[in-house]
Image (cartoon, grey):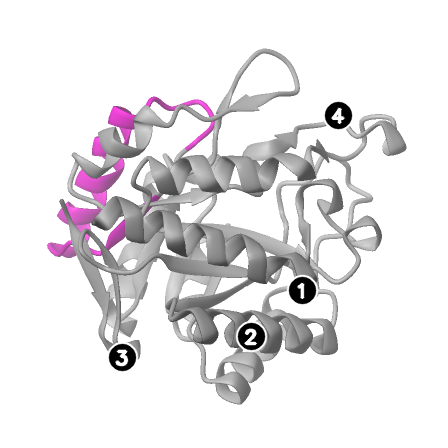
Amino acid sequence: MAALELKRWNLSIGAGHPLVVIAGLNVLEDLELARDAARHLKAVCADLGLPYVFKASFDKANRSSIRSYRGPGLEEGLKILRQIKDEFDVPICTDLHEIDQAEPVAAVADLVQIPAFLCRQTDLVVATARATQAAGGLLHVKKGQFLAPWDCRNILDKIKEAVEVDMTILCERGVSFGYNNLVVDMLGIAEMQALGAPVTIDATHAVQLPGANPKSNGASTGGRREGVPIIAKAAVAAGADGVFLEFHHDPDRALCDGPSCLPLNGAEPLLRTLKALRDAVQA
């Protein structure tokens, strides 16, 4: 089984290493909310001895409606993420959507994320891999909702051909199952690990109900927040190397994907359970 190291942070992910926590906000709303999330989550992870990466998006380009909140944008968003990185001394994870974002994002983010719907966009994947490798970071690639686990081999092959090094973490986030629903096949975690990459679980987006939020009459994505701990615990028990979780101090008032995110004060008990599960699996 594979393991990767983010050398500048002395952080390793994969077989034989602690569960990595990639957690924060769905999308940046303002600096103070980002500070609150980073401060709380870093402290919880430090107490539990879990490596921590702060996550937030500067732009949510894949929205159900053109009126949906997207975030502060590239320039202001990267400025906030840089401030969080420097102030709290934490690595950063954020996603990108366009080729010309690769270099500026890789200059700030230590874990550069390819969104699920874009994981087969060859030019974007190659450009992001090259920029991220040059900056000394790692890639976090979400498996598309339309892909089988073993189809991720093609993603890994593209990246390896582009940069000639192993630098990719794969992320399971569910697969489309009929209309407005996603399911997670826990057997897929081992299938993706067998391709030679560490694997995380995005338990937040795995409980989405795409385009099915009754409050907006389908103009935004719904979700089953109560399912996030279930998916996270099942995936860690199945051998996932990391968890991807989104929080908000008041999820019902979050500007994006509130139905799928957890209250910030729920982080400690969930992560404590996930650590215990990881320890049991590793033993």
Residue that mark 3 sits on = 8
Q: Residue at x 61, y 73 (%)?
A: 40
Whether label 3 touches label 2, CB < 8 Å: no
Mark 2, residues whose alpha carbon is within 10 Å: few (<14), some, or many (≥20)?
A: many
The magenta segment is 144-170
Q: Residue at x 58, y 11 (%)?
A: 178
Give the image location of residue 140, x and y in percent: 36, 52
First in sequence: mark 4 or mark 3?
3
- Work out whether mark 4 precedes mark 2 in sequence or the reverse, and give the earlier one: 2
Between discs 1 and 3, the one toward the N terminus: 3
Is the residue marked by circle 4 packed among few (<14), some (14-19), or many (20+) residues within 10 Å?
Answer: some
User: How far apart in space, not on screen, are marks 4 and 1 (Cα)?
Assistant: 23 Å
What amino acid type should be assigned to the residue bearing mark 2? Leu
Q: Are marks 1 and 2 in contact (CB under 8 Å)?
A: yes
Q: Nearer the viewer, residue 209 or 159?
A: 209
Query: Does residue 261 sit above or below 265 in this rendering?
Result: above
Q: Amino acid at mark 1?
A: Leu
User: What element does badge 4 sit on?
Assistant: loop
For mark 2, what is the residue? 81
Between the residue at mark 3 and the residue at mark 2, the CA separation in whole angstroms equals 17 Å
Q: Is residue 267 above or below residue 157?
A: below
For marks 1 and 2, the one nearer the N-term is 1
Task: Give the spatial CA distance, label 1 vs label 2.
Answer: 9 Å
**Is residue 95 at least partly visible in the picture?**
no
- In depth, the one of 81 and 246 nearer the eye is 246
Above or below, 87 relative to 128: below
Magenta stretch contains residue 154: yes
- The residue that label 4 is drawn on is 212
266 on left or right of 2: right
